[in-house]
Amino acid sequence: MLLLMMTIAQAKNLSSGEFEDTGHTLAAGQKQIDVFRASQFAISNELELSTVILGNSGRDARGGLLAGPNLGLEYAIQEGKQGALSVGVSLASDWQFTGQTLGGNVTWTKGGPGSNRFNLSGGGSVATVKLENVDRVNVPGTSLYASYHIVPSKKTTWRIYGGLDPLNTVRSEAFQGSLGFDWNHGFGESARVSLGLRLQTPTRLIAVFDSLDVDSSGLPAVFPVPTANLFFTW
């Protein structure tokens, strides 16, 4: 128990730049490895590289290194104690290089690195797929994302967030997006843990059912998915 209390006491403060849905970036030279969200590597105080190892980053179409190579860049146009503004671009492909996705977004944050903050992001993407005996097919997408970070202590951040693809929501006449919340806490010098719950549409599950020629009409319009993440920053 004493060791646990000492570990918690020594925890490094969580900052806005550690979350991919803010306009803040990491400090120059800082690195962050995420299991299920985007890992980030700061080149300078304003510019950072990112890649998704597993899962999906949430704000763009990158699916993780198991699905294929992916890379992102974020540049902070302005950041400080009052807020931040950044622009980002991402590129992803499958390992057969038959399909690629290019996306971009703008993120605005109201609030400082260690305080409550509101985040708003908007962007677009184009996915291109080469089908057998067919010319490449281009599929556009859009994203509108908002979140609010509640910071009750220097080592804990609660996130409430929601995302929407307006273009495909209108096209399909069905909600294409997600809503959720998570609890994030720092342990020791560099470890962080995130636990939460997300409500999302079964878009990917429907695609799997269709590929297996299984009827997907019985799937719920929205279903809950528990979320967990482990990340390290130094």
Image (spheres, rainbow, N blue to C red):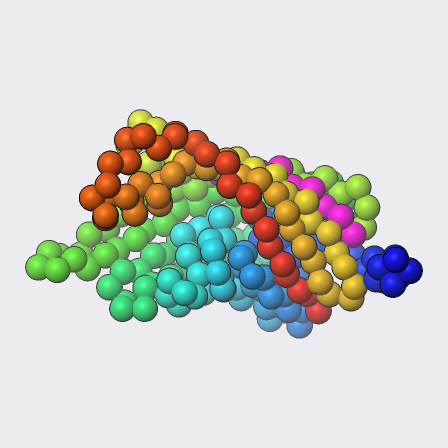
Residue 15, given in percent of the width and then of the height, sits at 72, 54
Q: Residue at x 59, y 51 (%)?
A: 228
Assess whether residue 162 is covered by the magenta stretch. Answer: yes
Residue 137 on the magenta segment: no
Q: What residue is at 28 percent from the left and 36 percent from the top?
A: 216
Can you name the residue that lies furthest to the left here? 133
Residue located at (13% from left, 57% from top) = 135
57 with respect to 213 (left or right): right
Please tell me in which quadrant of the rendered image residue 63 appears.
bottom left
Give how far across and how far down residue 121 sits, in percent: 52, 43
Query: Could you tell me which quadrant the N terminus lies in?
Result: bottom right
Residue 221 drawn at (x, y percent): 39, 29
Identified at 43% across, 66% down, the residue is 65
Q: Say if residue 11 shows up in the picture.
A: yes
For this orientation, the residue located farthest to the top is: 173
Report x, y in % for residue 90: 43, 59
Residue 119, image quadrant: top right
Of 177 and 49, nearer the camera is 177
Q: Is residue 42 left or right of residue 211?
A: right
Which SS type dominates the magenta stretch?
strand
**Span of residues in magenta:** 155-164
Please determine whether, in this image, residue 209 is positioned above or below residue 171.
below
Q: Is 199 or 137 nearer to us in this picture?
A: 199
**Residue 73 showing in the rendered view:** no
Q: Quadrant of the C terminus?
A: bottom right
In the displayed structure, would residue 47 be above or below residue 119? below
Total labels: the figure holds: 0
47 and 206: which is toward the camera: 206
Relative to 81, is 191 above or below? below
